[in-house]
Image (cartoon, rainbow, N blue to C red):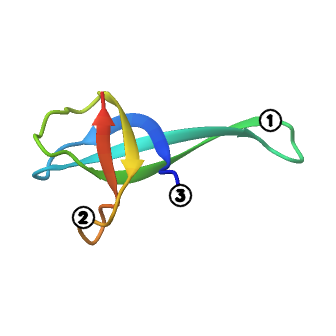
């Protein structure tokens, strides 16, 4: 099964080898026909602590690395 790839912005890098990535999605409301923005945060594995707050990154699904980490950074 192919792994999902998401693009988002780093919101936190306080933990060792972990970053928090905020991924925003846009969709049209079914009744109001208005564009709505929703965001969700994912915790991703950053092996070399290479990314800082504000960086745009791509993350992909992986096997669980810890209790909360199921994603890994693939590129900036």
| Viewport quadrant of the C terminus | top left
Disc 3 is placed on an element classified as loop
Q: Earlier in the sequence, mark 1 or mark 2?
A: 1
Q: Earlier in the sequence, mark 1 or mark 3?
A: 3
**Residue 36, x across and y down, in percent:** 69, 39
Cα separation between marks 2 and 3: 19 Å
How many C-alpha atoms fall within 10 Å of the one at disc 3: few (<14), some, or many (≥20)?
few
Task: Describe residue 38's horizontal placement relative to residue 16 as left or right.
Answer: right
**Residue 54, x across and y down, in percent:** 29, 28
Numbered tag placed on residue 65 in the rendering: 2
Cα separation between marks 1 and 2: 38 Å
Residue in view at x 35 percent, y 43 percent: 21
Q: Nearer the viewer, residue 4 or 39?
A: 4
How many C-alpha atoms fall within 10 Å of the one at disc 1: few (<14), some, or many (≥20)?
few
CB atoms at circles 1 and 3 under 8 Å apart?
no
Residue in view at x 80 percent, y 44 percent: 29
Cα separation between marks 1 and 3: 34 Å
Residue 55, relative to residue 58: is it above or below?
above
Residue 22, relative to residue 71: is it above or below?
above
- The image quadrant that residue 13 belongs to is top left
**Residue 46, x across and y down, in percent:** 19, 45
Task: Describe residue 37's horizontal placement relative to residue 57 as left or right.
Answer: right
Q: Which residue is mark 1?
A: 34
Q: Earlier in the sequence, mark 2 or mark 3?
A: 3
Numbered tag placed on residue 1 in the rendering: 3
Task: Describe residue 27's horizontal placement relative to residue 24 as left or right.
Answer: right
Disc 1 is placed on an element classified as loop
Residue in view at x 86 percent, y 47 percent: 30
């Amino acid at each position: 099964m192919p792994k999902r790839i998401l693009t988002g912005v780093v919101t936190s890098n306080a933990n060792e080898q972990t970053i928090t990535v905020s991924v925003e999605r846009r969709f049209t409301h079914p009744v109001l026909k208005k564009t709505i923005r929703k965001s969700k945060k994912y915790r991703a594995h950053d092996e070399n602590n290479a990314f800082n707050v504000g960086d745009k990154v791509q993350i992909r699904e992986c096997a669980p690395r810890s209790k909360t980490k199921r994603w890994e950074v693939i590129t900036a």
